[in-house]
Image: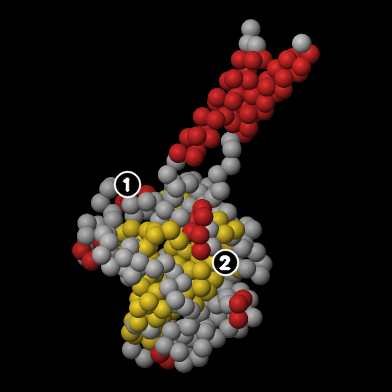
Amino acid sequence: MMTNRLMATIGIVATVAAYSCSAAAAPFTPVIDEFWVVKGDNGGPAAQTFRDSFNDGALPPSGPQDGLGGNPDTYNVFGSGGLTGETGPTTAPLGKLTMTPSNGDQVLITTAYADLGTVVTKLRSTANGNVNSLELADSFEIHGLYDLANLPQNTGQNFGIRASDRAPNLGNEGDDTIQLIVGRNVNTGVLGVALHELDFGADTIDRVDFFDIESIIDGGLATQIELVITKDASTAEIGAYFTIYGAGGMLGGNVLLTHDMDTFSTEQGANLAIYGGEDYTRAQFVAHDRVAVPAPASLGLLGLGLAGLGWMRRRAAAR
């Protein structure tokens, strides 16, 4: 027969082992290699207006500004604890920003699949006529190039880019944020690229499209993924696509797959659009994670162990 002392020992040992395994698991640390914006003023020729190669060793909000390096006000960072490393000019590999979103802040949409995250927003992009301002009359492309060495393993872990007309720090809450991320399908667990429309006013996320990339990643040849959100001049409609690169990454030019995302929202009954009354859009890159909680079995074992300890203490006190 199992004694209470033995039950307590089993419960405590099993619980500690469960938590130790959880603590020993490597954190989710996506790595972004490049982040840049291409813009065409009032339908004119497109040109790169901003690029961050993450190679000056200084974490955002520091970064290049209008072609100049080292500006401490390049970005606004939500969840700054989630930015955990940027390689310097003499440190290999050059030009990498490591993110650990579990160190970030609580997500602002409660219906989100993730709990914590980091959102990095390009500043100097809300003044009309500014070189970085993405206005309705302009065309633009927002690019994010990520390494594929550390992929999401669980639902709620993701990385990607956004186009957002929200600027609450300027008194403009906005209502439209388009998100293109790499993550796992909440229903199937399959790794893929998802296109979302985020409504911060309604506290909702609408998944517009999801494309399975599990098979091409499993081949072991994929090294980088480029995520792109686009808009043509004088329209509010948004486009999105991604490219997966093999050996040598984007610089190697070895393209394994390019895919256009479906931007028709069945919930809205129309193509994705931005500029809901606002006259600008801001570029963002993001990473999210889900907070680990003890499994029910671990909690049960912990309760079993604590109950056994309580019984032993009462028994000792009665002696």
For the residues labelled 2 and 1, the Cα–Cα distance comes to 30 Å
Residue bearing the label numbered 2:
198
Image vertical order of residue 161 relative to residue 167, above or below: above
Q: Earlier in the sequence, mark 2 or mark 1?
A: 2
Can residue 239 be spotted in the picture? Answer: no
Identity of the residue furthest to the right in this view = 318
> Which percent across, then down, holds residue 250?
26, 65
- Residue at numbered disc 1: 218
Residue at left 50%, top 34%? 20
Amino acid identity at mark 2? Leu
Name the residue located 28 percent from the left edge and 54 percent from the top edge: 222
* Crowd tier of the residue under label 2, counting other residues whose Cα lies within 10 Å: few below 14, some 14–19, many 20 or above: many
Q: Quadrant of the C terminus?
A: top right
Identify the mark at residue 139; answer none if there is no mark. Answer: none
Within 10 Å of the Cα at label 1, are there few (<14), some (14-19), or many (20+) other Cα atoms?
Answer: few
- Helix, strand or loop at mark 2: strand
The amino acid pointed to by label 1 is Asp
The N terminus sits in image quarter = top right
Could you tell me which residue is drawn at 48 percent across and 59 percent down? 82
Cβ atoms at labels 2 and 1 below 8 Å apart: no
Where residue 125 sits in the image (x, y, percent)?
A: 48, 83
